[in-house]
Image (cartoon, helix red, strand yellow):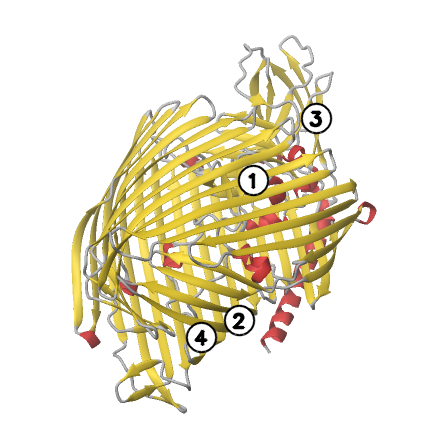
């Protein structure tokens, strides 16, 4: 029934999308606007090879480019819908002063005179392919000079560019730092969910990739608020702005596999659109297109609204998802942005996702105590049926005098799962149902005042509701041993509700080399948690076996803060001094619980950075923080979070006091395409609460106790990325090291542990002899967990090694033949080692006249159907065995338009 309703709904949506695409396609073929002119010097002599740039007034982003001919003339063809008053003309030449001219409505010819200047090269460029241009905090990559005929999307091309890392889920890092935004011609179409863009946008329509370091995207705050963000901007080619772009893909194969995708793209000055309809049962994770890769799109309420209940203890295997994801998924994604005039924009984003997936595993778990260990086994067969819809509507204005933004977000998710779990002579049938409703509205208004001071005003209201239910049935023996009761059927219910509201006012004084600002913030949060654990006998639900929860939680604070910044040409220093008065109260009549506390809190932070030359930078930071637990850390009634875990808390509210410090060094040499990054972070956190684990072979009880707990953590990273011109190879290596000291309380024994980890990750991407492409990614990891107290056993060592090699041969421009091999090796002390080798094959044939690509894929040629790996935590080891996808064959046809 659900599938029929979903299919009908998707059909209606697709019909609307197709109608919209047709209308946009027709409009894209309309007549162009020609903008022409001449460039000469003060004596009227033509200036050849002058750069004529057209940029947006709102963000100064480059949109069109043309060089003057030998007569100093230029002609630029713009889309017919271009509103000239949104742009300005900039003319540059190494021997002349740069000039900027506002474009006028109805004026299509410009006579431009340049005045000479002394030659001062503040921009470096590489004159041979591949090309990078660097100027100040901006680095621009020429996409065509890096991409090969194997690459389809801009994400494929990014992997070949030195300085960039593209993770498996699509997250982009530059010199080791995750980007904060991905813009498309200066517009934030996708917010933090840019993975769909890097996978769907063809690299052929992207002219360049611009990297902005220390980027402040709110114009009224530029030169007022120091930013450490790195953003990238995709510069769309002129020709692509005048048409509809997209791809339709359909494929099928053995055993009973299918893949389908339709996406449509429009990127011009007035409308930006990226729509996609996808479906497959071939292991492709559509949900990655919903993932927030920056962490900025999600609110605090979204991040903290995690489910309490689960149907198993093991997670996903340490394996690319395409090899183990047993799915049947469908997704619809619509991202639209409309520029109403030079200043105002409206953006709408809507996502739908439905899936049916299976997880089949068996594992052996061992938890280490002081002198002994507890082990248990489990085998799980689970069918999961998630459904998700989410959307947002944004109204936005961003000028040098005013910033106004209102973002409305909503989502609804539902997840049903049925699982059969067996282990240790017990068979348990599980039914888990989880739902969540979420709503959030965030308003921001930052006007510049007459004296060039800025007033920041923002407010937010958000609410969330999440009911959960877990039903457990064990006909062979009781799930929980309670005197005089046979608890073979149990029902655990939990419902959480959260509402919070905040108001923030900040005053920024006129910027000089020394700037300061002051802010006042008010915040209130209301939460409730209701739970019950009942036995079931036949159709009857009996009284609770333990007292449930009816917890009410309230937290509010008022904050008065000040920030002081020193900014010189190559040096910045920023100090933030917030003072907070916080009140927390919570009560549960069932436990005669009624407590509250008031605290004065001071959380200072300091950031410092120094530029060395144009591209090198050294930065450091320090911060002190006070954080508190929430209602999930204070409830008294036991909650059965899964079939073998009972979780409860003491009455003490958790408080963490933390010191955080670190530094980062970034070195960049654009002409040599050499990028180096170094970093170190230290954290020390002291908590007044420690989790106590009482572990038996049947059940794990977890209780939060009022005991002092300290944790220290060291993290270091070093990375280098280099393009080797003589080989045409992008190569790099990243090293990571971490050391963590923490404490575990297991079966009343305090166990101090030390965890060490070191990893090396080399990568290489090469084009050899014009016909051969080689890509290599490797990772070597060493993990060592050991007790810090002498005489305690159970020290653990684990070595893992993974490497992936992809080799493509292109005998012609129309044919590509490729092989991919992936090795995963695990070595453990006094245990069996695991070694797997996966092999895939691929062939592509292009028919340019029809704009069709035919593709054949053969996955997992060796037909490996099970995968084993080891997962280590501080004082436990989990030997997991998963059922994965066997051999598959797919034939696909893709039509581009």
Question: Residue 865: x, y in percent?
Answer: 60, 65
Q: Tell us which disc is closer to us: 4 or 1.
A: 1
Residue 178 higher or lower than 38, as above or below = below
Where is mark 1, residue-wise?
763
Where is mark 2, residue-wise?
385
As measured in the structure, the alpha-carbon distance from the residue carrying label 4 to the one carrying label 2 is 10 Å
Q: Earlier in the sequence, mark 3 or mark 1?
A: 3
Q: Tell us which disc is closer to us: 3 or 4.
A: 4
Q: Earlier in the sequence, mark 4 or mark 2?
A: 2
Q: Pointer 2: residues within 10 angstroms few (<14), some, or many (20+)?
A: some
Q: Is residue 235 visible?
A: no
Where is mark 3, residue-wise?
36
Furthest residue in direction top, as rendered: 43
Q: Tell us which disc is closer to us: 3 or 1.
A: 1
- Helix, strand or loop status at disc 2: strand
Q: Pointer 4: residues within 10 angstroms few (<14), some, or many (20+)?
A: many
750 or 404, which is in the foreground? 750
As measured in the structure, the alpha-carbon distance from the residue carrying label 3 to the one carrying label 2 is 58 Å
As measured in the structure, the alpha-carbon distance from the residue carrying label 4 to the one carrying label 1 is 42 Å
Q: Is residue 734 visible?
A: yes
Question: Residue 290: x, y in percent?
Answer: 52, 56
Residue 582 higher or lower than 147, as above or below = below
Q: Pointer 1: residues within 10 angstroms few (<14), some, or many (20+)?
A: many
- Helix, strand or loop status at disc 1: strand
- Determine whether label 3 and label 1 are within 8 Å by CB: no
Q: Pointer 3: residues within 10 angstroms few (<14), some, or many (20+)?
A: some
Q: Residue at x 56, y 45 (%)?
A: 340
Where is mark 4, residue-wise?
432
- Determine whether label 4 and label 1 are within 8 Å by CB: no
Image-based side of 693 in relation to 415, left or right: left
- Helix, strand or loop status at disc 3: strand
């Amino acid at each position: 029934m659900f599938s029929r309703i979903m299919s009908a709904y998707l059909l209606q949506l697709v019909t609307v999308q197709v109608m919209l695409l047709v209308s946009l396609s027709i409009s894209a073929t309309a007549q162009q606007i020609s903008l022409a002119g001449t460039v000469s010097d003060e004596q009227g002599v033509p200036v050849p090879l002058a750069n004529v740039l057209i940029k947006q007034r709102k963000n100064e982003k480059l949109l069109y480019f043309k060089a003057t001919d030998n007569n100093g003339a230029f002609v630029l063809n713009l889309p017919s819908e271009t509103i000239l008053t949104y742009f300005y003309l900039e003319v540059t030449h190494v021997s002349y002063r740069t000039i900027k001219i506002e474009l006028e409505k109805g004026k299509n010819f410009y006579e431009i005179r340049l005045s000479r200047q002394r030659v001062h090269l503040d921009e470096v460029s590489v004159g041979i392919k591949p090309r990078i241009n660097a100027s100040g905090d901006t680095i621009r990559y020429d996409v065509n000079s890096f991409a090969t005929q194997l690459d389809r999307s801009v994400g494929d091309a990014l992997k070949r560019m030195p300085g960039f890392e593209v993770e498996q889920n699509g997250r982009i890092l530059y010199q080791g730092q995750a980007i904060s935004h991905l813009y498309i011609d200066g517009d934030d179409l996708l917010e933090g969910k840019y993975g769909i863009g890097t996978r769907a946008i063809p690299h052929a329509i992207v002219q360049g990739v611009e990297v902005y370091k220390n980027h402040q995207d709110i114009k009224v705050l530029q030169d007022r608020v120091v930013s450490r963000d790195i953003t990238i901007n995709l510069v769309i080619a002129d020709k692509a702005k005048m048409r509809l772009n997209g791809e339709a893909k359909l494929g099928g194969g053995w055993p009973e596999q299918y893949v389908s995708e339709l996406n449509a793209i429009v990127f011009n000055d007035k409308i930006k659109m990226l729509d996609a309809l996808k479906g497959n049962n071939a292991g492709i994770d559509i949900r990655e297109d919903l993932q927030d890769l920056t962490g900025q799109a999600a609110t605090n309420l979204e991040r903290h609204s995690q489910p309490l209940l689960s149907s198993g203890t093991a997670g996903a295997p340490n394996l690319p998802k395409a090899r183990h994801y047993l799915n049947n998924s469908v997704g619809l994604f619509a991202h639209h942005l409309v520029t109403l005039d030079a200043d105002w924009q409206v953006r709408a984003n809507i996502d739908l996702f439905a899936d049916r997936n299976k997880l089949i595993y068996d594992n052996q778990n061992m938890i280490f105590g002081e002198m002994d260990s507890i082990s248990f086994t489990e085998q799980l067969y689970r069918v999961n049926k998630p459904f998700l819809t989410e959307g947002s509507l944004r109204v936005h204005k961003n000028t040098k005098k005013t910033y106004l933004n209102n973002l409305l977000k909503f989502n609804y998710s539902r997840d049903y799962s049925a699982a059969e779990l067996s282990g240790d002579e017990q068979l348990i049938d599980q039914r888990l149902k989880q739902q969540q409703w979420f709503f959030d509205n965030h308003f921001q208004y930052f006007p510049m005042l007459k004296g060039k001071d800025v007033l920041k005003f923002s407010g937010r209201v958000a609410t969330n509701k999440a009911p959960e239910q877990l039903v457990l049935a064990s006909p062979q023996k009781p799930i929980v041993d309670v005197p005089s009761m046979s608890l073979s059927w149990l029902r655990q219910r939990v419902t959480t509700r959260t509402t919070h509201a905040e108001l923030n006012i900040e005053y920024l004084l006129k910027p000089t080399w020394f700037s300061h600002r002051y802010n006042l913030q008010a915040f209130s949060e209301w939460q409730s948690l209701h739970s019950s654990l009942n036995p079931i006998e036949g159709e009857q639900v009996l009284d609770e076996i333990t007292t449930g929860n009816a917890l009410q939680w309230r937290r509010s604070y008022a904050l008065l803060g000040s920030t002081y910044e020193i900014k010189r040409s190559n040096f910045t220093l920023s100090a933030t001094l917030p003072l907070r008065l916080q009140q927390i109260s919570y009560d549960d009549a069932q436990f005669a619980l009624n407590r509250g506390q008031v605290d004065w809190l001071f959380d200072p932070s300091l950031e410092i950075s120094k530029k060395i030359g144009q591209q090198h930078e050294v930065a450091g930071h320090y911060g002190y923080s006070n954080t508190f637990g929430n209602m999930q850390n204070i409830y008294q009634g036991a909650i059965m979070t899964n079939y073998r875990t009972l979780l409860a808390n003491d009455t003490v509210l958790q408080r963490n006091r933390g010191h955080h410090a670190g530094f980062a060094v970034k070195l960049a040499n654009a002409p040599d395409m050499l990028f180096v990054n170094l970093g170190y972070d230290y954290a020390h956190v002291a908590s007044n609460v420690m989790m106590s684990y009482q572990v038996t072979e049947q059940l794990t009880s977890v209780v939060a106790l009022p005991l002092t707990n300290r944790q220290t953590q060291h993290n270091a990273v070093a990375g280098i990325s280099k393009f080797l011109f003589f080989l045409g190879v992008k190569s790099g290596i990243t090293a990571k090291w971490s050391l963590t000291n923490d404490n575990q309380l297991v079966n009343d024994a305090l166990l101090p542990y030390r965890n060490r980890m070191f990893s090396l990750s080399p990568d290489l991407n090469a084009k050899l002899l014009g016909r051969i492409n080689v890509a290599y990614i490797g990772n070597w990891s060493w993990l060592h967990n050991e007790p810090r107290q002498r005489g305690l056993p159970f020290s653990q060592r684990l070595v893992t090694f993974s490497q992936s090699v992809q080799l493509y041969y292109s005998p012609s421009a129309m044919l590509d033949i490729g092989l991919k091999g992936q090795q995963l090796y695990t070595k453990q002390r006094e245990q069996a080692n695991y070694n797997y080798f996966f092999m895939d094959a691929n062939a592509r044939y292009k028919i340019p006249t029809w704009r069709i690509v035919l593709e054949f894929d053969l996955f997992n040629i060796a037909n490996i159907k099970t995968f084993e790996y080891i997962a280590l935590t501080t004082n436990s080891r989990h030997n997991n065995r998963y059922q994965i996808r066997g051999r598959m064959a797919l034939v696909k046809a893709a039509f581009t338009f």
